[in-house]
Image (tube, rainbow, N blue to C red):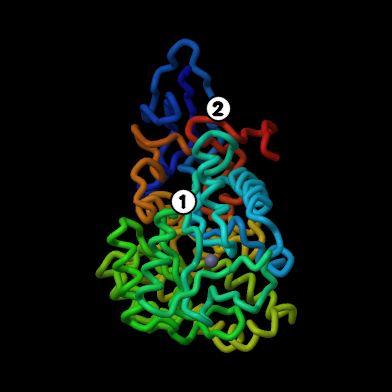
Amino acid sequence: MAATILVCGRLFDGIGDALTGPVEIRIEDGRIVERGASTGHPSGARVVDLSDRTVMPGFIDTHVHLCIDGLNLRQQTLQCPATKALGGLHLAQQYMRCGFTTLRDMGTLDAEWPTVNLRDAIDGGLVHGPRLVVAAHMISATGGHADMQGAFPCRCHLGLSKVADSPGRIRELVRMEHAFGGDWIKTMNTGGYMSFGDDPARVTWFEEEMQCLAEAAHQLGLPVAVHTGAAEGCRQALRAGARSLEHCYLIDDEGIRMAEKNGAFLVPTMQMTREDKALLEAHRLPAQATWKFSRDVDAIETAQRRMANSHAKIAYGTDCGMFPFSHGILEFQAMVAAGLSPLRALKAATSVAAELLQRNDIGVIEPGRQADIVAMPGDPVADIAATANVDFVMRAGRIYRHGTYDPLR
Ligand SMILES: [Zn+2]
């Protein structure tokens, strides 16, 4: 395949502490082969002029739900897994147009494996879309955050939830996730806001249950992501060796210190709090969420500032699916509003997210890595809102968006 040369005005490479440039990037066979002031232009090379753009690694969102429609769960639970996978494909493609070239999907509510199938279809080149890393289902205690028994209709008596209340059953569920192609194990050790009958301020796993889940996952080589709220839930997840803590709604100073020490990643999903706050103010938050969220919203925002002021590793994650994917890009602005520097927010969506995913082939613009690259007008270090104006998207060396060329639209 002929080389592609990107002529870049400014570059954020994913790890540096300042923009550099002008710089050129040479890409061959989907990978970056050279980066420098001038890479030379071999005959036949395609030259792409991004000299008036800021260029950076493709964004990585480490917490989405492509196959959960949070606003229409009741209707969606009657859909078959193929319908969910096709809907997820559409969302993934539209999200890639905004600059997201890798997504970690954090679970479905389906007895089958639609996100695993979608990941495999994209990997196999059957359809175009971002790289997917998936936790197929969410493992929860009875009455815990992912327990949908009785809350929604299900299709043909197929269970929506993966519920366990004993070490044996927990191991069985982890083994099933492994056997059917999950990349991660996702669990919930506290309640959540939108669910019925649980409370984010209460821990739902006992210590032995959380430890058992983590041990089973680690033995099978799967990292663990824990939806968690209560400060004690955050600490319990960290004690069990979770690789990432999702939301961390009520994390305290001790939890932050533990995360800093053991290197766990925090995924604070700050835009979701803004979405829920807007619903609360408009009196449109569902009743089961209103009492919990109105009680906690100030404490959640305090915890987010605590995370922003820490040295813990913070990765970009949104929870899109629970709210529209078109708002997922706003996590950058929410992070900066909470106190992260723009550079740290950019790293959260590139090199830090790649480290969370244990992927040393993405997230940084350097020779040897996949050519997942985006560009935008303006300077996102000076004004983080520039991230919302991506108009060039490349994944594995293939251009999916450039000016008026926009085939996935
Ligand atoms: Zn989620």
Instruction: Identify residue for label 1.
Output: 133
Q: Secondary structure at mark 1?
A: strand
Looking at the picture, which amino acid does disc 1 mark? Val
The picture quadrant where one finds residue 24 is: top left
Could you tell me residue 150's position as x and y percent?
A: 64, 79
- Tell me if the residue at label 1 has its CB under 8 Å from ligand 1: no
- 126 sits left or right of 9 in the view: right
Query: What residue type is disc 2 on?
Result: Asp
Viewer-side residue, 172 vs 125:
172
Count of numbered tags: 2
Q: Is residue 196 above or below residue 146?
A: below
User: Label 2 crowding class (10 Å Cα cut-off): few <14, some 14-19, many 20+?
Assistant: few
Rendered image quadrant of residue 33: top left
Q: Is mark 2 within 8 Å of ligand 1?
A: no
Question: Could you say where residue 374 lies in the image, as x and y percent from the top left?
Answer: 53, 40
> Measuring 44% from the left and 32% from the top, which residue is drawn there?
22
**Residue drawn where x is 43% and y is 43% of the image:** 12
The residue drawn where x is 63% and y is 74% is 276
Instruction: Give the alpha-carbon distance from disc 2 to disc 1, as whole Å.
Output: 32 Å
**Where does residue 80 sit, x and y in percent of width and height?**
67, 56
Q: Is residue 70 visible?
A: yes
The disc, 2 or 1, on the residue closer to the chain's N-terminal end is: 2
Position of the C terminus, as image quadrant, is: top right
Q: Name above or below for residue 196 compared with residue 28.
A: below
Query: Which one is in front in this view, the residue at disc 2 or the one at disc 1?
Result: 1
**Extreme residue toward the top, this view:** 43
Q: Residue at 46% x, 80% y: name it.
A: 190
Please name the residue that numbered disc 2 is placed on. Answer: 49
**Residue at far front of view:** 157
Relative to 240, 150 lies left or right: right
Across and down, in percent, residue 71 comes to: 70, 67
Q: Is residue 190 left or right of residue 401?
A: left
